[in-house]
Image (cartoon, rainbow, N blue to C red):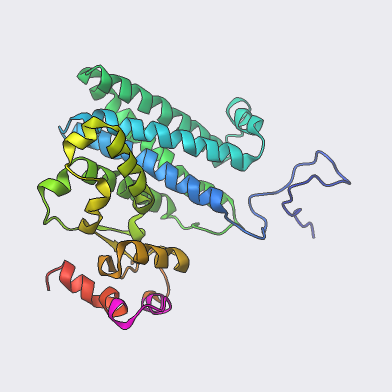
């Protein structure tokens, strides 16, 4: 029986230069902080442009769609690329992905999708800056398509890492698109003044808010720096977080506990991910395992949902 070699940071001293299997072998820590940052930053970048392009096609314009969204996307797609280069450990490897591609690898496809997304975001920003409506019309569908590809390819990439389990079901790509939409939509709901104009609007962000909880501080910083944003809403974006409900699908007990501390237990409803296969086996037990006080636990397990749905 031939066993594949284990992934290791160093070359095999007996066979220097030989290729190593890395994706589908056991690792002591399957996913690290770099993967968390990568998913978060990519969700913000692609989600902002998904929403901006969709809004433009629906007839909604304005500086949030034409300027703020692409600027946010460019910043976060740059950070995504930086994390990817760091994860590869050698910067030249990213260059080789582009110049000597292995088209069977979803990492190669992803690198090109991210590059195209950055170029189209820059073109969108330029068209918005110079008020070129015809250019934005021409860019809208390509931007929408490339944003979908840039956010969903990771699901296929994960499927190639057979021993680095995260999401390997057929719904992974769809799930990533939804999380990207959450990040972009939540940011634009706040910064576009929708929640200011409609204070009674109730919005639930699934998967514990996706990337949005990590984005709140950055939105506040943008509020300080950009006059257009201050013209859209009269107070900091973080003051609107009370308009959102989040579900409990953080897939990490420590993260969920921190989110509950940040947003308060009154803003959470229980999540199951049904009918998708990656939901928790015991969502109720997962909430009870957090060790919350009785009132907070009862609120999350039913009281908040009754209040949210006005039952």
Image coords of residue 184 (percent x, y): 31, 43
Horizontal side of residue 161 vs 22, given as left or right: left
Splitting the image into 4 quarters, where does residue 67 fall?
top left
Report the predominant secondary structure element of the magenta stretch: helix
**Residue 102 drawn above or below residue 239:** above
Q: Is residue 285 magenta?
A: yes
Which residue corresponds to the image point at 58% horizontal and 36% vertical from the top-left?
A: 85
Farthest right residue in view: 14
Horizontal side of residue 302 vs 199, given as left or right: right
Splitting the image into 4 quarters, where does residue 209 fall?
bottom left
Image coords of residue 124 (percent x, y): 31, 25
Horizontal side of residue 9 vs 274, given as left or right: right
The magenta stretch is: 284-296
Query: Foreground residue, 270 or 293?
Result: 293
Farthest bottom residue in view: 294
Splitting the image into 4 quarters, where does residue 310 fall?
bottom left
Which residue corresponds to the image point at 20% horizontal and 20% vertical from the top-left?
A: 133
**Residue 58 drawn above or below residue 261:** above
Which residue corresponds to the image point at 74% horizontal and 51% vertical from the top-left?
A: 8
Q: Is residue 88 magenta?
A: no
**Residue 124 drawn above or below residue 81:** above
Image coords of residue 46 (percent x, y): 37, 39
Which residue corresponds to the image point at 67% horizontal and 35% vertical from the top-left?
A: 90
Q: How many marks?
A: 0
Image coords of residue 225 (percent x, y): 31, 33
Q: Quadrant of the C terminus?
A: bottom left
Horizontal side of residue 222 vs 108, given as left or right: left
Q: Quadrant of the N terminus?
A: bottom right
Query: Foreground residue, 235 or 12?
Result: 235
| One can see residue 3 in this view | yes
| One can see residue 109 in this view | no
């Amino acid at each position: 029986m031939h066993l594949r070699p284990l992934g290791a940071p160093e070359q095999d001293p007996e066979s220097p230069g030989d290729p190593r299997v890395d994706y589908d072998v056991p690792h002591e820590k399957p996913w690290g902080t770099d993967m968390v940052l990568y998913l978060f930053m990519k969700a913000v970048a692609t989600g902002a442009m998904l929403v901006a392009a969709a809004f433009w096609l629906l007839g909604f314009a304005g500086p949030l769609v034409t300027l703020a969204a692409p600027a946010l996307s460019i910043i976060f797609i740059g950070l995504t690329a930086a994390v990817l280069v760091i994860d590869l450990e050698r910067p030249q490897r990213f260059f080789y992905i582009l110049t000597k591609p292995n088209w069977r690898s979803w990492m190669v496809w992803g690198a090109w999708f991210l590059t195209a997304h950055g170029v189209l975001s820059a073109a969108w920003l330029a068209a918005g800056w110079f008020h070129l409506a015809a250019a934005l019309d021409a860019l809208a569908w390509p931007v929408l398509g490339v944003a979908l590809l840039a956010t969903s390819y990771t699901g296929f990439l994960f499927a190639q890492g057979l021993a680095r389990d995260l999401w390997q079901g057929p719904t992974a790509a769809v799930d990533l698109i939804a999380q990207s939409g959450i990040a972009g939509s939540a940011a634009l709901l706040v910064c576009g003044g929708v929640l200011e104009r409609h204070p009674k609007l109730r919005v639930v962000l699934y998967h514990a808010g996706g990337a949005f909880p990590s984005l709140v501080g950055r939105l506040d910083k943008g509020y300080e720096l950009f006059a257009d944003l201050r013209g859209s809403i009269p107070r900091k974006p973080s003051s609107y977080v009370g308009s959102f409900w989040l579900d409990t699908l953080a897939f990490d007990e420590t993260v969920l506990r921190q989110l509950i501390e940040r947003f308060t237990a009154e803003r959470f409803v229980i999540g199951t991910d049904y009918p998708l296969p990656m939901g928790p086996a015991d969502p109720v037990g997962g909430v009870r395992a957090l060790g919350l006080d009785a009132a907070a636990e009862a609120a999350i397990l039913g009281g908040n949902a009754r209040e949210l749905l006005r039952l």
